Every structure is written in structure tokens, then in C-alpha cells.
Amino acid sequence: MKKYVCSACGYVYDPAVGDPDSGVAPGTAFEDIPADWVCPVCGVGKDEFEAE
């Protein structure tokens, strides 16, 4: 699975790690994250992320 980078702050979403603090389990592909998920660092939406 690909990692995705926040274009605003540089946070990297790693599917192997997920985002447990936001309810996204490890092993969750970026495409499978809910549409209302936001970057845990700066708060921008999924549309601000690009494939690494």
C-alpha cells in the first residue's frame, strides 16, 4: 500500500501504522479512510494529500 503525504504540513500517512488516534486502524488503505478524516497534524482534508 502506498503512503500519502500532506501537501500542507508534510505529515505522511502510512497504511501500516494507520491513525489510531482518529479511529483509523493499522492496515487501512488511504482510499478506505472515511471522507471526513483530516490530517492529524494540521487538519486539512484528504484532498490535500498526494501519493508518495
Image: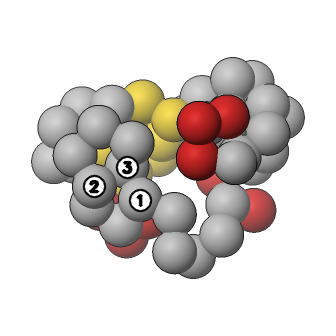
Instruction: Say which quarter of the image contains residue 45.
Output: bottom left
- Residue drawn at x 75%, y 24% as measured from the top left: 16
- Residue drawn at x 71%, y 46% as measured from the top left: 24
Circle 1: element type: loop
Residue 43, how many percent across, how many down?
A: 28, 55
Is residue 31 in view from this perspective? no
Give the amino acid type for the residue marked by disc 1 in the picture. Answer: Val
Residue 22, how many percent across, how many down?
A: 59, 47
The answer to whether marks 1 and 3 mark residues whose Cβ atoms lie closer than 8 Å is yes
Determine which of the numbered discs, if any, sits on residue 43 in the image.
2
The answer to whether marks 1 and 2 mark residues whose Cβ atoms lie closer than 8 Å is yes
Farthest-out residue, bottom:
35
Is residue 4 in view from this perspective? yes
Farthest-out residue, top:
17
Give the amino acid type for the residue marked by disc 3 in the picture. Answer: Cys
Q: Is residue 9 above or below residue 31?
A: above
Q: Is residue 37 above or below residue 23?
A: below
Q: Is residue 44 left or right of residue 36?
A: left
- Residue drawn at x 29%, y 37% as measured from the top left: 41
Residue that mark 1 sits on: 38
Mark 2 to mark 3 CA distance (whole Å): 5 Å
Q: Is residue 3 left or right of residue 32?
A: left
Classify 10 Å Cα crowding around label 1: few (below 14), some (14-19), many (20 and above): some
Mark 1 to mark 2 CA distance (whole Å): 5 Å
Determine which of the numbered discs, if any, sits on residue 39 in the image.
3
